[in-house]
Image: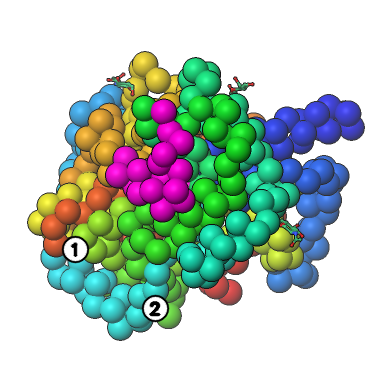
Amino acid sequence: MVSRGCFVVLFHCLISLSWTSENSEHKAKKYTRPCYNEDELLNLCTDPIETCHEERGDEIKLVRIDGVKKGHVRWVELEEGRKHQMITRALKPLLFEIPEFLSEEECDHIIKLAKENGLAMSIAGFDMKAYEGDLDEDMAEADGNWTLDHDEKFAGQFSIWDVNKDSFIDADEVKHFARKRKLLYMRDDEVSAMYERLQLSKILEDGKLSRQAFAKINIKKILWYMDFLKEKSPQHRPRFSEQTWLRQDKNSDPVLRRLLERITKLTQLPEIVIQGGEWMQVVQYQPFGHYHGHLDSNPIEGPTVPCCHQNHFRKSDCRVCRFITILYYLNDVEEGGETAFLIADNTTITPQELENPNATTDEFNLSVNCHMANLVIPPRKGTAIMWYNNFIDPDSGLLGSVDRYSLHGGCDVIKGEKWVANNWLTAPTKYSRHIRSLYDVSG
Ligand SMILES: *[C@@H]1O[C@H](CO)[C@@H](O)[C@H](O)[C@H]1NC(C)=O
Ligand SMILES: *[C@@H]1O[C@H](CO)[C@@H](O)[C@H](O)[C@H]1NC(C)=O
Ligand SMILES: *[C@@H]1O[C@H](CO)[C@@H](O)[C@H](O)[C@H]1NC(C)=O
Ligand SMILES: *[C@@H]1O[C@H](CO)[C@@H](O)[C@H](O)[C@H]1NC(C)=O
C-alpha cells in the first residue's frame, strides 16, 4: 500500500514536469522537489471545530451535463419565463454555448462594476522579475561574465536548440526555443534584429548558426535579450490584458447574485460547490490583447499538492482545481477576440503530441493559430461558453483528472476592445472533500 502510493505520487510529479503550457517554467521549478507523504494532507481539517472544515463535504457529488452530440440543442429555463438555448459545441472537452445568457443590461452592468473596482495588468504566466534593467548595461555586463545562471545552464547545450538535428540553428528553432523556454513568441524580423543587435549576423551561414559558431558565442546575451524583449513589449507576453475580481456572495451586487442562481440551475451542481467558486473575474483586452493556449485547471493529481481554493494552510504550492469555466462575452468586438479551443474534438493530434517540448508546431500562439483551432467561438455580447476542465473521479464523484482537450486561449483583438467575465467553479478532490473552499463565505 505504502509503496504503491509512493509510486503514484512520483508518477504525478513526473507528469507535471513534462507538461508545458503557459507557466510551464514556473511549474517545472515548483514541482521538481521531492513529494511529501501521502497522509500529510489527509490529516488536515478533519476536526469539525476547525473553520476550514467542510461539514457538508460528504454531500458533494459532481455532475456533467450530457452533451448528447456535437450540435445538439436543448432549451433550458433558468429563470421563470426566460428560456435559453444551450448548444453542444464539443464533446472533447464537453462544451456548451448559450447565446444571450446575459442581457445587454447585465453585460453593461458588469463592465461598469469592473471599471468602478479598477483593473490591473494580468500577470499569469509572466515573470515580473524577468527584466528590469537597461539593455546596453546588461549586454556589457554579460560581456564581462559569460557564465550562465544555474537554472539556465541547459541553454548552453546545442541539442536543446537544434530541434531537427541538422547541426544548424535556424530562425524557426530560435523562435521555438524562445517559446518553449522563455514563453516568448518572437517574429522572424525580431530574430534578425536580435542577431544584429548582438553583432552575430556576420557569423551566420545562410541565416543559420552552426554548431561551431554556437560554441563560440555568449549565450547569456541571447537569453538576456529575450528577457528584454519579453519585458519591453507586452504583446510578447503569453497573456496581455487587464483584470479585476468581483465578489459574488450573499452581500454582493444583486445582478451578480442572480447570475449565480442561474448558473446553479445551468450546471445542476450542488449549491455548496457554486458557493465555493472563485470570485468573478472581469478581463479587458485592448488591440493586441490575447491569451495564448492554456488550461484552466492544473493537471496534477494526488494528495500532495492542495487545491488553491482550499489552501488554508498556505502551502507554497497549490494547484488550480477548476471543474467548470463559464466565460461570458460582455461586448461585441469590432474584429478578433475569438476564444479558440485548439484541439477540441480533434482526432488527429493528441494533447501529448502538442505538449511535447520537441514539437515544432506553434499551436500555443493564437496570434498565428487562432483560426487553425478546431473550435473558434467569436465574441457576441451576452453569449456564455461553459466547459468542463476536469472529468469526474469515478470512485468518489469528485474532481477527477484534467481534460487536456480543454486547452484554449483568447485570440488577438485586432480592432476595438474586448470585455469578458469568467466564473470558475472549483471543486474538491477525493482527498479534500472535507476542506472548505476559501471563497465560501456563506457562514
Ligand atoms: C558570473 O555569473 C554567474 C551566474 O550569474 C555568477 O554565479 C558568478 O558569480 C559571476 N561571476 C562573477 C565573477 O561575477
Ligand atoms: C505569434 O507568432 C507570430 C508569428 O510568429 C508573431 O508575429 C507574433 O508576434 C506572435 N504573437 C505574440 C503575441 O507573440
Ligand atoms: C486536428 O489537428 C490537426 C493538426 O493540428 C489538423 O491538421 C486537423 O485538421 C485537426 N482537425 C481534426 C478534426 O482532426
Ligand atoms: C526530445 O528530444 C530529445 C532529443 O532527441 C529526447 O531525448 C527526448 O526524449 C525528447 N522528449 C520527448 C518528450 O519526446
Disc 2 from disc 1: Cα separation: 27 Å
**Left or right, residue 220 beside residue 415:** right
Quarter of the rendering containing residue 46 = bottom right
What's the residue type where badge 1 is placed? Glu
Start-end of magenta stretch: 183-205
- Front one among 119 and 102: 119
Query: Percent position (x, y) of residue 356?
Result: 52, 27
Residue in the picture at 33% in, 57% down: 235
Residue 401 lies in the magenta stretch: no
Residue 122 seen in this snapshot: yes
Residue in the picture at 28% in, 32% down: 373
Q: Which residue is mark 1?
A: 417
Q: Which residue is mark 2?
A: 252
Residue in the picture at 17% in, 54% down: 414
Q: Residues within 10 Å of mark 1 (few under 14, many from 20)?
A: some
Mark 2: is the Cβ under 8 angstroms from ligand 2? Answer: no
Residue 203 lies in the magenta stretch: yes
What's the residue type where badge 2 is placed? Ser
- Front one among 400 and 421: 421
Q: Quadrant of ligand 4?
A: top right
Quarter of the rendering containing residue 28 = top right
Q: Residues within 10 Å of mark 2 (few under 14, many from 20)?
A: few
